Image (cartoon, rainbow, N blue to C red):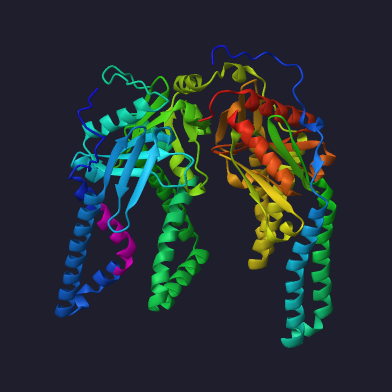
Amino acid sequence: MENFKNDVVLELPNITEIAFTKVDKNYFKVICINFLLFFIPLLVVLIVLHHFVISEEFLGKTTFIYIAFFLFFEYIFLHLFLGFPKRKYAVREKDISYTSGLFIKKMTTVPFSRIQHVEIDEKPVSRLFDLAALSVYTAGDSSDDLEIKGIKKETAQQIKEFISTKINE
Amino acid sequence: MNNSFNFSEFSRQSPKGILVIYINLIYRVIKLTWIFLFIILKDFSKISNVGANYFYLGLVSVLIFLLVRAYLIYKNFQFKIDGEEFILKQGILKKTNTSVPFYRIQNINFKQNIIQQIINVFEVSIETAGSTKSEISIKALSYDKAKALKEIISNSSSLDTKTFTELDRKPLVKISVKELFKVSLTENHLQNLFLFLALVLGFFQQIQQIADSLGRTESLDGFISESTDAVSTSFFVVFILIIILTITALISSFVRIFLIHFNLVAYLNDDSFEINQGLFTKKSIVLKKQKVQNITVSTNPIKRIIGISFITFKQAVSGKLNKKKNKLIKIVGCKKDQVATIKSSLFDFEEVEFQNKQYPDSYYKKRVYIFSFLFLIALYIGVYFLHPHLEIFYSTIITVPLFVFLIRKKLKKRFYKITDSLLLVGRGLLETHATYLEVFKVQNIKLKQTFFQKKSNVADIILQTASGKITIPCLQYNEAIKIYNHALYKVEISKKSWM
């Protein structure tokens, strides 16, 4: 460690200047399917409640409840829709970054030298479109590590390989 | 070096260990069943002779069963050292074989509870980082054997601990009873009171659960509503209650501090700290400097007057949050020069001390004020719904200035300083905490910007370390990006191991 030199650098590599790649377009379809899988059962439950559990108090407010229900899910869907182009990732020589968020913009960078392990997940719906999620784990609190959802399985595999070779260097 | 012990063959702990395990088992059984025991003993006189005999018989058979179990646990607990690994065989019916490579071992700690003190054996616990497996503990070893084991492991591990000379070592910090008294007196009593009340509340809940199942809720409810009525009617009772709470707070501070930190002695070695403390359970901890992730120097106004502060060391945690508490290592009652010694032994802190404090953007001020007052308003609305009298709003004469005072304190203490290698973050409300983090120990880094923050061109920086996160709120966006880039650069060029 003694002969380690640390010269003053005037210009550090800047995170804002790197080109981020958007996640795969098909992933939006996955989001939509997942959304519907969540939304439709709830809607069915609501309709069943409306038609079979007849209560006087409930009947008076049906329209209001339906409007509230649809507005809520419309908001969630809009949030997903507008937030989708914000999901971007970038791999540099020594680190990997992910940014997302519509109202709350988040950017996370994990240096390769701190990665404990890398994982590729393929959820059932994503698999239909040949997509995967790449997660990297560090020694910190695992909930705050980095996960890139919705990239081509091939890309995920490549990034994983790349990180593995970099870690072992 | 005393290595007359042969660790290459499987060996058992000291036979005295049976006693330690036995008492531990009894303790655990009592802890699980104390409420039932309590109920039985309370009405013991009402139980007929025959019933009492059954009770004794049951008790004796449980004790014998536990003794046999303790013996079998002892018999089946074997360990050895094989090459660079520590191997442990245990289990009566379900056999487990654990092997821990030396490089994974974070700490080897000695511990003595009161029984172990009486029969003069040491409990050796081997802490590992990164694995979710609970640490290995050997309940009873003679001092010589424990020492020999520790020496073998720490000597052959890649991170050599130099064998320190036992005799002429001067302790870095030594806290006498008188000093510990001062420390206890200046504790954050409010916090200790809450801890104590939480404990008592948990205790009562347990009783209530049992009472519920026995159908005695009515009497208990009656008691509670009676006493609450009394509280709201009589000012005198409130007064008494406040005095009782104050005394409880003081006593709980004293008990807590004395139990944990009694006879605190800390040594500074070449590459580690050694901390010995405890009243009933003596603990000896060796803390490798390299494995310290960050340290926090804390003080409060009263402590500052008598010139003491306490230092919290944070080590890497293994993912699970509940283990965090064990990994916090505290040295209380440090004087200024001792704090400086500890800091300088870990890193070069001179430069950071001389820098000017950087404060968050004025956006932060706005945010804290808005959130606090929203909270206050919500609180008043809530109270008003429960207790609809306009008189309660008179109390704003006190609460609003108090809030403003606290917010101003909080804002004043929120600062950061950053040099090439070190980050210092200050925070606190009544207490003051200063956290020192070596930049290269960061695990990952996050930038967060809400919609409103974006309008004001500020952002939060969250530095994730192996022992929790450190947040710097509401920095100017450019400044935040600068820190982001700098931290990444430092991590990526660093060749040093972060633990």
Q: Position of residue B287 (x, y in %)?
A: 42, 30
- Name the residue at 55% across, 18% down: B348
Q: Position of residue B99 (x, y in %)?
A: 37, 42
Q: Is residue B431 above or below residue B200?
A: above
Outermost residue toward the top in this view: A3
Left or right: B137 with respect to B327? left
Q: Main secondary structure of the magenta part?
A: helix
Residue A159 vs residue B453, the one in the foreground: A159
Which quarter of the rendered picture does the N terminus of chain B lie within? top left
- The reply to whether residue B448 is visible in this rendering is no
Left or right: B461 with respect to B287? right
Any magenta on residue B375?
no
Please tell me in which quadrant of the rendered image residue A144 appears: top right
Residue B23 vs residue A147, the one in the foreground: A147
- The reply to whether residue B421 is visible in this rendering is yes
Q: Position of residue B110 (x, y in %)?
A: 31, 36
Please tell me in which quadrant of the rendered image residue B489 appears: top right
Residue B325 vs residue B209, the one in the foreground: B325
Left or right: B88 with respect to B356? left
The residue stretch that appears in magenta: B24-36
Residue B53 vs residue A88, the one in the foreground: A88
Q: Is residue B364 above or below residue B172?
A: below
**How many numbered circles are shown?**
0
- Name the residue at 54% across, 29% down: B498
Q: Position of residue B92 (x, y in %)?
A: 27, 56
